[in-house]
C-alpha cells in the first residue's frame, strides 16, 4: 500500500469524509444520490478507473478540452474531496483560463492514478455510513430511499464508478480530473 493510501486510511475515516463532504453537498441544489456516490467513490478510490491507458485518457481529455465551453465561470480550480485534502477535483475550465495546458493535466491525472490507491473497503465503509446517516436524516434530494435504490443497483455490479446525475450535469457541466494534492501543487501556481 502506498504512503498516500495509508495517509488516507489514517486521516479520512468514513465519518470524517462525510463530516467534510455533506456540508459541500448541501450547497449544491441539484445534487443527487448519484453525485454523493461519485464524490465518495472518487475520494476513496481516486481516478484510476478513468485511465485505462495514456492514449484513452488523452483522447477523452482532448475532446473535453475542446468542447467544455466557458460556463460556469465561478468554479474553483481545486476542490478537495476529503478533509486531509490528499485528493481532489482539478476543474478544467479555470485551469485552462489561467493558461494551463492539457498535457499538464494529462500527466498529473495519470501520475495520480498510479500514485493514489486505497482499499475498496474504504468506499464500502463510507457508502454504508452515508446510508446510516441518511436513514436518520436526508437533505435536499439526497434521501435514504434514494440511497437504498442506488445501493441495490450498485451492489449487484460490485460498486463500480458512476457518472454524475443528469441534474448535476445540466446545472454544473462538470469538467475535471481527479488528481492528488501533490500533483495539483505541481501544476497550479501558488
Image (cartoon, rainbow, N blue to C red):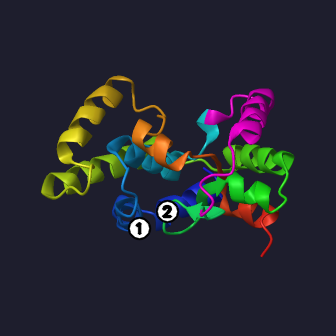
The residue positioned 79% from the left and 44% from the top of the image is 106
Residue 19: quadrant of the picture: bottom left
Residues tagged 2 and 1 counted as in contact (Cβ below 8 A): yes
Give the side of residue 18 with respect to residue 89, left or right: left
Give the side of residue 76 with respect to residue 65, left or right: left
Coordinates of residue 72 in the picture (x, y in percent): 59, 55
Q: Residue furthest left?
A: 136
| Label 2 residue SS | loop
Q: Magenta stretch?
A: 50-74
The residue positioned 43% from the left and 50% from the top of the image is 40
According to the picture, the residue beneath numbered tag 2 turns out to be: 82
Coordinates of residue 64 in the picture (x, y in percent): 71, 37
Q: In which quarter of the image is the C terminus?
A: bottom right
Coordinates of residue 68 in the picture (x, y in percent): 68, 42
| Sequence-earlier tag: 2 or 1 | 1
Q: In this view, does 167 lie above or below 14?
A: above
According to the picture, the residue beneath numbered tag 1 turns out to be: 20
- In the image, 89 versus 12, the foreground residue is 89
Picture mark count: 2
The residue positioned 24% from the left and 33% from the top of the image is 149
Label the magenta part by its dominant secondary structure. Answer: helix
Q: In this view, does 35 lie above or below 75?
A: above
**Residue 9 on the magenta span:** no
Amino acid at each position: 500500500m502506498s504512503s498516500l493510501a495509508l495517509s488516507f486510511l489514517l486521516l479520512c475515516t468514513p465519518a470524517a469524509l462525510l463530516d467534510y463532504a455533506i456540508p459541500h453537498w448541501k450547497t449544491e441544489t441539484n445534487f443527487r444520490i448519484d453525485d454523493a456516490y461519485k464524490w465518495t467513490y472518487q475520494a476513496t478510490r481516486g481516478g484510476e478507473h478513468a485511465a485505462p491507458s495514456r492514449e484513452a485518457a488523452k483522447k477523452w481529455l482532448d475532446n473535453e478540452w475542446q468542447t467544455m465551453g466557458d460556463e460556469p465561470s465561478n468554479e474553483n480550480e481545486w476542490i478537495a474531496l476529503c478533509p486531509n485534502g490528499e485528493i481532489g477535483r482539478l476543474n478544467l475550465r479555470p485551469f485552462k483560463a489561467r493558461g494551463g495546458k492539457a498535457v499538464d493535466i494529462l500527466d498529473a491525472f495519470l501520475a495520480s492514478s498510479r500514485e493514489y490507491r486505497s482499499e475498496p473497503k474504504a468506499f464500502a465503509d463510507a457508502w454504508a455510513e452515508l446510508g446510516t446517516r441518511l436513514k436518520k436524516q436526508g437533505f435536499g434530494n439526497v434521501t435514504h430511499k434514494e440511497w437504498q435504490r442506488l445501493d441495490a443497483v450498485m451492489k449487484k455490479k460490485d460498486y463500480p464508478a458512476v457518472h454524475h446525475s443528469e441534474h448535476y450535469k445540466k446545472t454544473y457541466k462538470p469538467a475535471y480530473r481527479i488528481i492528488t494534492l501533490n500533483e495539483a501543487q505541481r501544476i497550479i501556481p501558488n
